[in-house]
Image: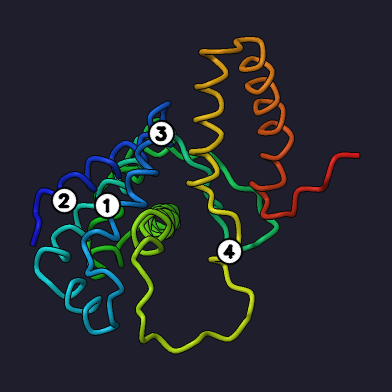
């Protein structure tokens, strides 16, 4: 087992989680390094042997904690009501000092039973964030088993745009433009700023974003 490879992957996951201009490069590295943990053209049994190994389980825990730390390092939008029509609100260490801490994600289910309703919502939101981030940056990059049964041709969330990959491409484009065409970088940045302001109210309320005319 190549423990150095696990360390390289964790470093790239740190970069992806933190964002920034090197995120695209880190995500590209993951596309090569995660499959390298597994045999070439693996069987289901060979994949399971890796994911059941102590090395993978230790890596899994460290990787998920990276994304959990990223979640609690910046303000997040969370719907604090079960009502799907209720607007999401911003939570952070200023507005919810006692609830918006890493322990909210990491404590076991028994301890979390005493959480306030707000902290319970933050816990679920952080767990969803970590689960999706791990799937997009690790699980989806595991090579397909050569003996896996054929899947029915049905729509799945894996066929939807990859948020992390899309952000990485946009970040890379912005970096290149900033070096070679600053006016183009400014136009892209202004466009992104306008899009975020336009889309945020719809996304915060769980609504589809209407196309601009």
Rendered residue at 36%/35% (across/down): 18
Are there few (<14), some (14-19), or many (20+) residues within 10 Å of tag 1? some
Q: Mark 3 points at which residue?
A: 19
Q: What element carries label 2?
A: helix
Q: Quadrant of the N terminus?
A: bottom left
Looking at the rendered structure, the secondary structure element under dot 4 is loop
Q: How far apart are marks 1 and 2 (CA)?
A: 7 Å
Locate residue 91, reporting x and y percent. 46, 40
- Measured in 3D between alpha carbons, the distance from the residue under mark 3 to the one under mark 4, in whole angstroms, is 30 Å
- Residue bearing mark 1: 33
- Which is more N-terminal, label 2 or label 1? 2
- Here the colouring is rainbow
In the rendered image, which quarter contains the C terminus? Answer: top right
Front disc: 1 or 4 = 1
Q: In the displayed structure, would residue 121 be above or below residue 102?
A: below
From the viewer's perspective, tell me whether residue 56 is left or right of residue 191.
Answer: left
Q: Contact (CB < 8 A) between labels 1 and 2? A: yes
Label 2, on which residue?
5
**Residue 82, which numbered label?**
4
The Cα atoms of the two marked residues, 1 and 4, are separated by 40 Å
Instruction: Give the residue at the far top of this rendering.
Output: 182
Farthest residue in the front direction?
A: 40
Q: How crowded is mark 2: few (under 14 residues within 10 Å), some or many (20 or more)?
A: some
């Amino acid at each position: 087992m190549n423990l150095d490879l696990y360390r390289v992957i964790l470093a790239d996951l740190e970069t992806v989680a933190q964002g920034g201009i090197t995120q695209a490069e880190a995500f590209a590295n993951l596309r090569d390094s995660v499959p390298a943990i597994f045999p070439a053209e693996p069987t289901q049994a060979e994949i399971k042997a890796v994911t059941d190994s102590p090395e993978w389980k230790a890596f899994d825990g460290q990787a998920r904690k990276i994304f959990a730390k990223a979640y609690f390092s910046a303000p997040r939008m969370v719907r604090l009501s079960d009502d799907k029509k209720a607007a999401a609100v911003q939570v952070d260490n200023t507005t919810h000092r006692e609830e918006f801490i890493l322990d909210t994600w990491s404590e076991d289910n028994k301890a979390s039973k005493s959480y306030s309703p707000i902290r319970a919502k933050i816990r679920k939101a952080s767990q969803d964030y970590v689960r999706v981030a791990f799937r997009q940056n690790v699980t989806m990059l595991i090579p397909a088993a050569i003996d896996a049964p054929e899947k029915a041709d049905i729509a799945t969330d894996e066929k939807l745009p990859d948020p992390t990959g899309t952000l990485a491409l946009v970040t890379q484009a912005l970096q290149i433009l900033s070096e070679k065409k600053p006016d183009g970088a400014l136009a892209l940045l202004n466009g992104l700023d306008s899009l975020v302001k336009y889309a945020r109210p719809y996304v915060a309320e769980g609504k589809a974003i209407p196309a601009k005319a």
